[in-house]
Structures are given as C-alpha cells and as structure tokens.
Image (spheres, rainbow, N blue to C red):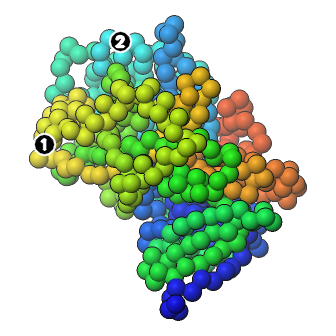
Amino acid sequence: MTKSNKNTIQEKDAVLIGAGIMSATLGIMLNQILPEASIEVFERLDEVAAESSDAWNNAGTGHSALCELNYTPQLPDGSVEIKKAINIAEQFEVSKEFWAHLVEKGVLKDPTQFIKSIPHMSFVWGNDNVDYLRKRYDAMINHHLFKGMEYSEDKNIIEKWIPLIMEGRAANQPVAATKMDIGTDVNFGALTRYLFDYLRKQANFKLRLAHEVKDLERMPDGRWKIEVKNSTTKRKRTILAKFVFIGAGGGALHLLEKSDIKEGKGFGGFPVSGQWLRCTNPKVIAQHEAKVYGKAAVGSPPMSVPHLDTRIIDGKKALLFGPYAGFSTKFLKNGSWFDLPSSIKINNIRPMLAAGLDNLKLTKYLIDQVRQSPDDRIGALREYVPSARKEDWELEIAGQRVQVIKKDPVHGGVLEFGTEVVSSGDGSLSALLGASPGASTSVSIMIKLLQKCFPDRVKTEQWESKFKEMIPSYGQSLASNAELAYKTRSQSSEILKLDQLVEETA
C-alpha cells in the first residue's frame, strides 16, 4: 500500500459535514460557547458555499414572510392564515440578532458585504387574487412584525413602486401590491465564507475541502467513526467524533441512511432542480429595485412561487426571474444521476411510493417545466414584465433542492416543503433535511438542534448566558412581545446598516 493510502485515526469533539450556511452557523455557535472544543468540517467540493448557499443557487431573499404568499394560505372559509408567516418572520429577526452580535464582536467585518435593504413586495392581478391580497394585508397589518406594510390597488402608486412590472400592462387589468421597505437581500454564500474565514483562524478548528465522507458508524462507546477520503490525494482518514452534524444539503439523506439511526428510518427525498432567467441589460436592471413575489399557478408546488428579484452579488446589482422548476435524479447540483435511486431503501420505499402516488400532478408539473422552450420561459416572465425582450435575458442554472418525504400513518408517506431536523435519541448525531426557508432561519434551526442534542448543557448558566449574549431575545417571544420585537429589530438593523421603520424607532 502506498503512503497516500494509509489510514490515520484522529479524535474530535464535533464533526460537521458540509460547508454551507448551516455548518458555518453551528460551527460559530459551538466556537462561541465552547472555544476549547475541537471541531472539524468536511466538504466534498473544493470551496465553501458552492451548493445551496451560493448566491446564484438561491433567491437570496431574507425570508421573513413579508412578501412570500405561500406562507399565508387562504383557508376554505376565505380567510387568510398567517401563523406560518409570523413564525418565519420571528425566526429571521433572530438571525439578524445573531449576525449583528457577530458584527459587534468582529467576527463579521462589514455587514453590507452580505446583507442589504431591499423592499419586499407581493404583486397579483385578477379579481380573485386582488381579493386574496387585500385579505392577507388586513390580517398581517394588525401584527407588530408586519407593521409598516403598505397596500395599494392604485395603478399610479404601484407604477412608482415597480415601474418595470407595470410598463405595458393592460389598463383594465385589476392589480394589487403590498410593500415592506425593511425587506433584505442576503448573500448567503458571502456570509458563509466570512464565517468560515473567522473559524479557520481558531486554534481548535479545521476545515477540510475536497474531503468526502464515505461512511459513518456508531461505536459501542457512543462515539461516531467517520470514514473520509481526500478527493485530491485519495488518502483515507478515520475520525472518531463525540458529535456529528450532517448539514450536507441534498447529500444529507444518504449520510443519514448510512448512520443507521432508528430516528432516520422512513425518510426519503424528492429532488427538484431550478433555473432562473438572468437579465443581461443594465438599463432593464436599473429600472427595478425590489423583490416581488407573485402567486403560484394553480396546481404548482410552493417552491415554484414566481418572483422578480433585485440582487446584489459581489457588489454588483443583478435581476433574476424564476424559479423555473425541473426534475433531476441528482440530490446536489454537483451530484450523481444515481442519487435518487440509491436513496431508496426497504425502510423508506413505502413512504416514497405513497408520496409519489399522491403527487403525480407535481411530477407532471416538473416534467412540463423541464420541457419548456425559451419562448415558454419568456412567456412566463412577460406575465410580470410585459415589455420583456428575449435578448435581454439568459438562462442560469440554480441549486438543487431535495424535499423531505416522511412516514405518515394515514397516507403511508407525505411530501413536505421546508426543513426537518432528525436527531439520534442520545443527541450524538443530527441531520438537516429539506430546503427553503432554511438559510434565512438557520440561526433558529441551529438553536433548536443544540437544545435537542445537548438538553442538559443548554440549561446550564454557562450555555444560557452565552445564548443570551449571542441572541438578546433568547428565551423570549418576539412574536408576542411587540416592545421587545421593535427594540431588537432596531438594534440589529442599526448594526447591520439596514433601513428601519420610523414608527419603531421614534
């Protein structure tokens, strides 16, 4: 055996798999709470944040439910439910608190390099959709987290807000829009890189790029034996870790299956690919200054909600429209065509088949999306930008998402949209499955993960004081405490150099 193939064994307190926003967030939290803990991160690619966290692979919307209509469904009685919107808005405020703390501590240098203010808007047309948006506004404006939201059916006002969307629109078409100026655009790729830049300078932290975790097994003493291969040198390593986090995006399901924990049995994944139309005309880009979310077409999945997004990527303004969904058997953008078939096991085949049968319309929808021609895509764009010209837009491949399939006592299996944390009973291993609004709510997700995996430690004075230092509102509800919500939002917005509502700071 050559020297490059020798297997070495090392011990670590924690191993994090995947170098995206989730591992970066958890790594920072662990480092702040337990600076003496040895942490190692393994990423199969040769750079961090190259999959779902990359700026071109996600919408970059600081998901705070200000504009995303799929978070506010209309109920059979005609009313609009905003519970999910409140929950997501609260979680994003927690994320901003944490990022503001990191700026104050010097972990993050210039917040404008990863987060900027941009209005969040909803825009609809047609009498039924206008009626829905009016009811949505009426329900949301009464909650303090959505104070300051503007609503209009006046074409002149909406034209001032979003001239590009109103240009060339039929004069007799009923339209409505809401607007929140405190929305944000977040470059999660840049944020992830900044967090890892800090972590790499810490004595007990190691980041290993181009290292793929091939297997993991629980040892009799409760630790995890992790087999890792260097993709460049082909050298293999064995790590013994007390705690493992699988935050590998679409690749998390396969690793969860390899762990063989009983809590992970029955989970499956449904991959959904994405594409954007990216504007190449600077004059068109300059005409739009907002993130505008519309209503998904009848029968289409929640992740297909169309939006016209102003983005700031690497200091440059960009304009994207989409997403155009599609179907691929890959679980990662840089994955294998065999990802889906190889994920099917005896323990999850029934839930996956049941979910598949219940979502045949979704499958057909995704296949139809794949078959779209350039003219079809421009046609969809023109519903939002009537004056759009094909020559001003080019196709951009977005990230791959794997929606969660889980066991269900009634249907056998259900397809869920969102994120799911799966942890072993002893808390020694935890995996994150699913997709949006994951990145925006990463801080709340990681707090809950730590509470679940370290239930005794989080109750100690040391851990609790650290959490309160990192997140001033820790242990309190921003959703039910308006004074606290205004205070923390004002503080974090000032530190992050974001726009604020006058009503909150007066």
Amino acid bearing label 2? Asp
Please name whichever residue, 233 or 135, is drawn nearer the observer in this view of the structure.
233
| Residue under numbered circle 2 | 128
Place of residue 30 in the rendered image (x, y in percent of width and height, measured from the top left): 71, 63
Asked where in the image residue 461 lies, by quadrant, the reply is bottom right
Please name whichever residue, 238 or 197, is drawn nearer the observer in this view of the structure.
238
| Residue under numbered circle 1 | 390
Place of residue 176 in the rendered image (x, y in percent of width and height, measured from the top left): 35, 20
Q: Against 339, is 148 above or below? A: above
Q: Which residue is drawn at 46% across and 56% down?
A: 53
Specify whether residue 222 is in view: yes
Alpha-carbon span between mark 2 and mark 1 = 30 Å
Query: What is the crowding at mark 1: few (fewer than 14 residues within 10 Å), some, or many (at least 20)?
Result: some
Task: Say if mark 2 contacts mark 1, CB within 8 Å.
Answer: no
- Return the residue found at the far bottom: 3
Place of residue 493 in the rendered image (x, y in percent of width and height, measured from the top left): 57, 48
